Image: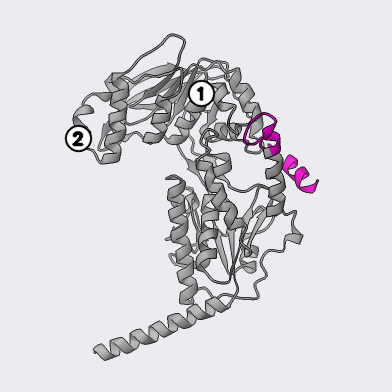
Amino acid sequence: MWKWTKIIGNVNQRIFKANYSESKAKTIKACIVGSGPAGFYSAQYILKHLPNSHVDIIEKLPVPFGLVRFGVAPDHPEVKNVINTFTKTAEHPNFRFIGNVSVGTDITLQELRNCYDIVLLAYGANIDAKLNIPGEDKRNVLSAREFVGWYNGQPNLDKLNPDLSGESAVLLGQGNVAVDVARILLSTIDDLRKTDITEHALEALSKSRVKKVYLVGRRGPLQAAFTIKELREMLKLPNVDTNWRSSDFVNVKEQVESLPRPRKRITELMIKSLEENKSNEGNKNFLPIFYRSPLQINGESNVESVDLTITKVVDNKAIPTEDVENIPAQLVCRSIGYKSVCIDDAINFDDKRGMIKNTNGRVLQKDANTPDIGLYVAGWLGTGPTGVILTTMNNAFAVSQTIIDDVHSGAIKCDSTKPGLDPKKYNVVTWSDWEKIDKREIENGKKSNKPREKRLSIEEMMKIVKS
């Protein structure tokens, strides 16, 4: 029995080696849709670990980097350093950046699959989850995604024009994005001038009269969604007092010792800050509130206040009570998460969860529970909008390894006749074109001692490309 097991094992090993040698000999053409962290990390991994692979990244905008460019706060330049890693990937001889091409509009998914052996969808989550409460459509009720895009130079969001003439802003949600918005609203203009924040946002914030920013969460301090790094930054903001409600921390101190280390550290920081609660006249105020859920947004045409249902936490869930609190607000931002969109009818998409149905990154066939071999998904499009850039990197590497395993096992029949996308058929922005835009943005930034001044519209970007 042992002999037969060994013989079968040796045969399987030879088959695997033969398939590996075959995949090594052939040119494997892979296409990644989306140039954010998931896309670039996947390209990096595939190029490194799959011999003779050629990788194209297709991006609907003329500029790369997705969430790193348009989502990371301007006062977090260290997070944007990952762009240096992505640029090294882009300089690989077997890599192409194909910008200004929209899958689902300029080209269908099936046409793309006809051009490549492997298609990996990694275009992220770019629409907002909604509250679905009365008053959500009032003037100056925005999504955090829109507000972040406004100050980060996302195309066409420069026209958002938020009204910052009121004293009070309410942020619904307590994740890091909500804290980013709070920090930008409360930071000094002198500090913001040193960043790559857009000029129109800097101008508006310089005239802002916002002095109070409420950060509202449905659950309690033990379930706070922001990280300790983000909280520390808020606590250190000059001329900003952080004011907690002591009623939110009843019996919290007694539970600290039993908490897991990360949760223990952030809870200890909140308690320490609570014990130092102070309010200096003339200072701005950061006001985190727990056990509150948005019920209704009030006002005539513009928002004037928010009704919050008071909640209690049972089994880690927020349960509404009959009690309601009203908070004055002239600006409201909801920050309750993102959803992906389906860019092609051929995709097996879960509309309710806003993500592509998959198993370990292998996209499932429509009306079937089996993988559609050759089609993959990575990042928030496949996992839902959770985690930070490091989380996305780990997911992208794992999905890329799945792709490599499928190549080596022979599940993907690599066809050396697959042509790849023909750039001549589209108004393509290449990597060298992006470098022109990049250079112009940096030059314009130097005029005002900023790292860069981003181009705000696709038309502006294309003019630079063609100049």
Q: Is residue 444 magenta?
A: yes
Q: Is 11 drawn above or below residue 184 in the view shown? A: below
The residue located at (72%, 54%) in the rendering is: 428
* Residue picked out by circle 2: 257
Q: Position of residue 136 (x, y in %)?
A: 51, 28
How crowded is the residue under tag 1: few (<14 C-alpha within 10 Å), some, or many (20+)? some
Q: Position of residue 84 (x, y in %)?
A: 56, 49
Distance of label 2 from label 1 (alpha carbons): 34 Å
Amino acid residing under circle 1: Ser
Q: Residue furthest top?
A: 281
Question: Which region of the structure is painted magenta?
Answer: 443-467
Which residue occupies the foreground of this view, 244 or 360?
Answer: 244
Q: Is 368 drawn above or below residue 234 in the view shown? A: below
Q: Position of residue 208 (x, y in %)?
A: 57, 18
Q: Residue furthest right?
A: 467
Q: Is residue 320 visible?
A: no
Left or right, 89 with reference to 289: right
Left or right, 458 with reference to 240: right
Q: Is 264 drawn above or below residue 300 in the view shown? A: below
> Residue 11 sits in which quadrant?
bottom left
Q: Is residue 186 visible?
A: yes
Tell me the element at label 2.
helix
Q: Position of residue 331 (x, y in %)?
A: 52, 22
Tell me the element at label 1.
loop
Q: Name the disc covering residue 187, or none.
A: 1
Which residue occupies the foreground of this view, 110 or 431?
Answer: 431
The residue located at (51%, 55%) in the rendering is: 41
The residue located at (55%, 34%) in the rendering is: 74
The residue located at (42%, 31%) in the rendering is: 173
Left or right, 264 with reference to 37: left
